[in-house]
Amino acid sequence: MLSLNLPSFETKIDIREGKKVIFDIIRKRYVPLTSEEWVRQHFVHFLIACKGYPQSLLANEVFIKLNSTVKRCDTVLYRRDLSARMIIEYKAPHVEITQRVFDQITRYNMTLRADYLVVSNGMKHYCCRMDYGQQSICFLKDIPDYHLL
């Protein structure tokens, strides 16, 4: 797989039914190894190992109801009261981060009302903080450490 702009970690990759799978430490099971999953696993390990995010407050593939449809958030960081603190959307490394990607995560946030929105393709990472009082967003220079949220 492609080298990303994220720290490497000790991966657990296997072949199941002729297809590559990778162990997801959040879901605690092997999942199909796609380019987007490669980014997700690297990013989750980065959040836990480098940024101090509690593994127990992260969830992958979170289903939400948006109007009359069901959507899936790639990763959600929760507070201890189980309200959403951060939504993270991943794209494969070859997928450019465009306004459409931000529109997608913003739609998810209509339901969850998280404080932070993060988008990453493994090469570029964007993080913004929502200010609901001022109805604005502020792009941050880096992904914040957990204790700074």
Image (cartoon, rainbow, N blue to C red):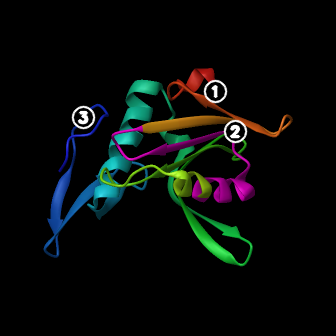
The mark that comes first in sequence, 1 or 2, is 2
What's drawn in magenta, residue-wise?
A: 104-124
Q: Is residue 134 left or right of residue 57?
A: right
Per the rendering, the mark at residue 8 is 3
- How many marks the image carries: the answer is 3
Name, please, the residue furthest toward the right.
133
> Which residue: 34% across, 48% down?
39
The amino acid beneath tag 3 is Ser
> Was residue 112 drawn as part of the magenta stretch in this picture?
yes
> Was residue 115 drawn as part of the magenta stretch in this picture?
yes
Rendered-image quadrant of the C terminus: top right
> What residue does disc 2 label?
115
> What residue does disc 1 label?
149
Percent position of residue 98, x then y:
49, 51
Q: Residues within 10 Å of mark 1 (few under 14, many from 20)?
A: few
Q: Is residue 24 left or right of residue 65?
A: left
